[in-house]
Amino acid sequence: MEQVIVTVLLGFLAATAVAVIRIKNLFAIVMLFGVYSLLCASVFLIMDAGDVAFTEAAVGAGITTVLMLSTVALTGSAIRIDKGSDKRNKLMPLALVTLTGLALVWGTLDIPPYSDPAAPVHQHVAPRYIEDSPQEIGIPNMVASVLASYRGFDTLGEVAVVFTAGLGVLMLLGRKKRKDQNKS
Amino acid sequence: MDWLLKDWFSHYNYWIAIFLMMIGFYTVISRGNMVKQIVGLNIFQTSVFILYISLGNVAGGSAPIVREGITLFSNPLPHVLILTAIVVGVATSALGLALIVRIKEAYGTIEEDEIREVDRMRESVEIHIEDALQDKTLHEDTPR
């Protein structure tokens, strides 16, 4: 049953992604991307990744969509419609993408089947967190204890990345305002 | 045939992830509109998330939170990695979108080829100005 729901949702995801590259209006593209992120969050929830689903719904479907909408509001939502002459330019990317995709599919044939409990991923490291972390850290959510305690330094690095990105955005967009203030 | 059907269902998630990844890749390399490229980049990222979460799933398992009566859990490690990746992904998108806003202010367009054209025009104008200035200084140097 679970697998049926995942299959259908992943089908929806693929359809939404195809629609995103075909549509010519940026506002519609951004709204479709919001739908895509929410579908993604549902897939994660069904695949037992509750924390990831929350984050994807809040950050992917929420913040990213709002950021994209404000960018579209500042830059205009019309995409210039391509003339027929650059059809040849599209053949090359299509061939490249098909080749890469086929190579990757060939690579997946060695991956153990989906949700196989005997897969190598589940044999090492993870069992220790599953068995010992509730006693060692004292909270029932293993994802939280790995994120904030065992891998706390990684999370600190992540905070540094987000801080740098925020600083970059401020420096890029804050400059113009100051110039305006000087003028007036 | 039987083998194909079995393989199809056991690898369906991975193949959808690859399909989404290739759609994102195609959008990034073939479309000239920059907001669309950022959307493509985000689709590419999400496909990786789906791949990781699929790898971490265990048949009959449950979300990795200790409760009474639950003994089989999904692998918590991919979840942790992807949590970090989602937040870093939104940080990079925000930076890219801010750059797009600045590019729109500086060039008046967010289409890649139009930006290249504006650059070429500006370059040729600059060369003209330089030539004109050089001519002027040459004329000034020569005694009248």
Image: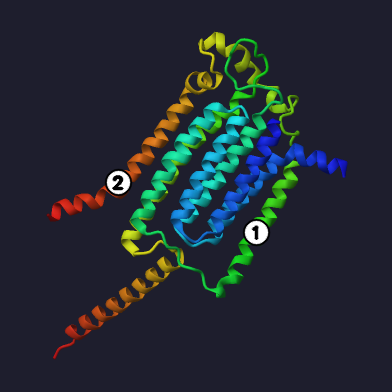
In the rendered image, the vertical position of residue B120 relative to residue B93, given as above or below: below
Q: Give me the chain letter of mark 1.
A: A
Residues packed near mark 2 inside 10 Å, few (<14), some (14 to 19) or many (20 plus): few
Q: Are marks 1 and 2 in contact (CB under 8 Å)?
A: no
- Residue under label 2, please give it: A171
In the rendered image, the vertical position of residue B84 relative to residue A11, given as above or below: above
For marks 1 and 2, give the CA distance: 37 Å
Residue type for callout 2? Met
| Res B26 quadrant in image | bottom right
Quadrant of the drawing holding the C terminus of chain B: bottom left
Query: Would you say residue A110 is visible in this rendering?
Result: no
Helix, strand or loop at mark 1: helix
First of labels 1, 2 by sequence position: 1
Picture coordinates of residue B120 (x, y %)? 39, 72
Picture coordinates of residue B23 (x, y %)? 60, 53
Q: Nearer the viewer, residue A42 or A119?
A: A42
- Residue under label 1, please give it: A96
On screen, residue A77 versus residue B27, left or right, reads: left
Quadrant of the drawing holding the N terminus of chain B: top right
